[in-house]
């Protein structure tokens, strides 16, 4: 199988999976979601030497939006050595959780450094520098959390995103 045939086959298989993931999984449901006739959807799903046509991007995008999963897009990304990463709410929550863990770790280091520095009642220049550095790290982490929250997190009220 040539490289062209292989990627063509993978796109066709992914498109078949995409059609099954839309609504009831019928050609009619996929046609309605994409604005394309069910016969045309069938043509895009057919794997044969007589049928070379791949689905247009607008059709793929409409169906991926309808089912909420980038099935064909993920296959195309893998074929070029890339991977899709979810940047939705689950990813934002993961990012926030990781930032909170980092914040907790640095805060613990700050508490420890400050208490050790205060043990003799005097703060040396090195101790002040160490504590100040930890405060700066905390400020940077908080800035990252605020940026992530502003760009990816949404307030949920009663199970629906607040406007």
Image: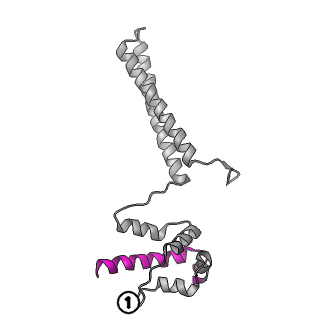
Q: How dense is the environment of label 1, judged by Cα within 10 Å: few (below 14), some, or many (20 and up)?
A: few
Q: Residue at x 41, y 69 (%)?
A: 75
Q: Write down the residue under mark 1.
A: 49
Image point 35% across, 68% down: which residue? Answer: 79
Instruction: Determine which quarter of the picture holds residue 115.
Output: top left
Question: Residue 152: where, in percent of width, then height?
Answer: 55, 49
* Residue at the far left in the pictured view: 2
Q: What residue is drawn where x is 54% and y is 77%?
A: 20
Residue 26 lies in the magenta stretch: yes
Q: Where does the image place residue 42, in percent across and percent down from the top left?
A: 52, 86
Give residue 92's position: percent from left, percent from top. 52, 49
Nearer the observer, 51 or 90: 51
* Residue furthest bottom as drawn: 50
Name of the residue lying farthest toward the top: 121
For the magenta stretch, what is the residue range? 1-27
- Write down the quadrant of residue 32 in the picture: bottom right
Q: Residue at 48% of width from left, 57% of height from top? A: 86
Residue 9: image location, x then y, percent: 38, 80
Which of the pair 25/139 is nearer the observer?
139
Image side of residue 156 versus residue 21, left or right: right
* Drawn side of residue 115 relative to residue 41, left or right: left
Left or right: where 52 falls relative to 149: left
In front of the other: 36 or 128:
36
The answer to whether 73 is drawn above or below residue 129 in the figure is: below
Under circle 1, the secondary element is loop
Residue 129 painted magenta: no
**The N terminus sits in image quarter:** bottom left
For the stretch drawn in magenta, the main secondary structure is helix
């Amino acid at each position: 199988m040539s490289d062209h045939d292989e990627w063509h086959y993978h796109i066709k298989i992914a498109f078949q999976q995409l059609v099954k993931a839309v609504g009831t999984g019928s050609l009619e449901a996929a046609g309605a979601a994409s604005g394309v006739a069910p016969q045309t959807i069938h043509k895009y799903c057919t794997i044969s030497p007589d049928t070379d046509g791949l689905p247009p991007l607008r059709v793929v995008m409409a169906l991926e939006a309808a089912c909420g999963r980038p099935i064909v897009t993920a296959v195309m990304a893998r074929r070029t050595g890339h991977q899709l990463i979810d940047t939705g709410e689950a990813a934002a929550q993961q990012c926030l959780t990781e930032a909170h863990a980092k914040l907790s770790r640095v805060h613990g280091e700050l508490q420890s450094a400050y208490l050790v520095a205060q043990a003799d009642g005097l703060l040396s220049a090195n101790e002040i520098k160490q504590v100040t550095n930890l405060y700066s790290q905390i400020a940077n982490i908080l800035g990252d959390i605020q940026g992530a929250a502003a760009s990816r997190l949404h307030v949920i009220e009663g199970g629906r995103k607040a406007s």
